[in-house]
Image (tube, helix red, strand yellow):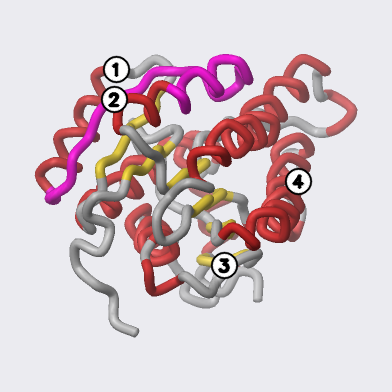
Amino acid sequence: MAIQDQALAEKVALVTGASRGIGRAIAVALGRRGARVFVNYQSREDAAHETCALVIAAGGQASPLQFDVGDAAAVEAGVKRAADEAGRLDILVNNAAVSIDQLLLRFKQEDWQKTLDVNLTGVFAACKAAARHLLKARAGGRILNLTSVVGEMGSAGQVAYTTAKAGVIGLTKTLARELAPRGVTVNAVSPGFVDTDMTAAAISDEARAKLLAQIPLARIGRPEEIANVIAFLAGPEAAYVTGQVIRVNGGLLM
């Protein structure tokens, strides 16, 4: 089935961590299909407004929405605020993430907790808060969770990040079974290495060269390539897809 332009018109989406990077690209891709997008951010209000402007330019509607994904109570309040303002919520994209890298024996307990609070507990809290609204969505609601290739294959020096991203996969599959009887689909997208501020800060030129040698397509991914998959899964063409982990990694993990 071909992708339908404006197939998300009248749909309301919330994208966490959408002020930059992959989250920004996702918000724009949903806007291009006609969605109204709530652009979540933690502190970069200026960047969130830039994302909103890009969503509007792409043909959608957008509003900034501030809350800390690492604070479960703030997540619940933020989801409610979006649903109350728009009168509905059809699509939740859990994209916000933090990566604190260190080997196990040097890893601090507080860094472990912060990483899990944002990358796993925050996803759980958003799913729980959004579920009651998504169950009311006409033609079915959508939950789309961003995991990572390292959540499937492991990564030395990223013990908390890989653990959280692996947990997102289990959460996705479980919620897919729980919510399917009400027509809500739940899927995960697993990016490989993508050019973002986070990866640029974490990967040296030497490490990047070694990484490229392991990727069959021999290049780093672009945020838009992740966003296009999310936009497909959010649309009517993917109504029969649930409980899946869609890999977008250039062949790094097959």
Residue tagged 1: 45
**What amino acid is at disc 2?**
Pro
Q: Earlier in the sequence, mark 1 or mark 2?
A: 1
Question: Which residue is depicted at the point 21% across and 33% down?
Answer: 52
- Magenta-span inclusion, residue 190: no
**What amino acid is at disc 1?**
Glu
Q: Nearer the viewer, residue 141 or 198?
A: 141
Separation of residues labelled 2 and 3 (CA atoms): 28 Å
Residue tagged 3: 246
Q: Earlier in the sequence, mark 3 or mark 1?
A: 1
Q: Earlier in the sequence, mark 3 or mark 4?
A: 4
**In this rendering, is residue 229 above or below 107?**
below
- Asked if disc 1 and disc 2 are in contact, CB closer than 8 Å, the reply is yes
- Mark 4 closeness class: few <14, some 14–19, many ≥20 residues within 10 Å: many
Question: Please, what secondary structure does the residue beneath circle 2 have?
Answer: strand
- Mark 1 closeness class: few <14, some 14–19, many ≥20 residues within 10 Å: some
**What amino acid is at disc 3?**
Ile
Separation of residues labelled 4 and 2 (CA atoms): 28 Å
Outermost residue toward the right in this view? 105
Tag nearer the camera, 2 or 3: 2
Q: Earlier in the sequence, mark 4 or mark 2?
A: 2
Residue tagged 2: 64
**What amino acid is at disc 4?**
Gly
Quarter assignment of residue 100? top right
- Residue 91 appears in the picture as rendered: yes
- Magenta-span inclusion, residue 62: yes
- Read off the magenta span: 58-80
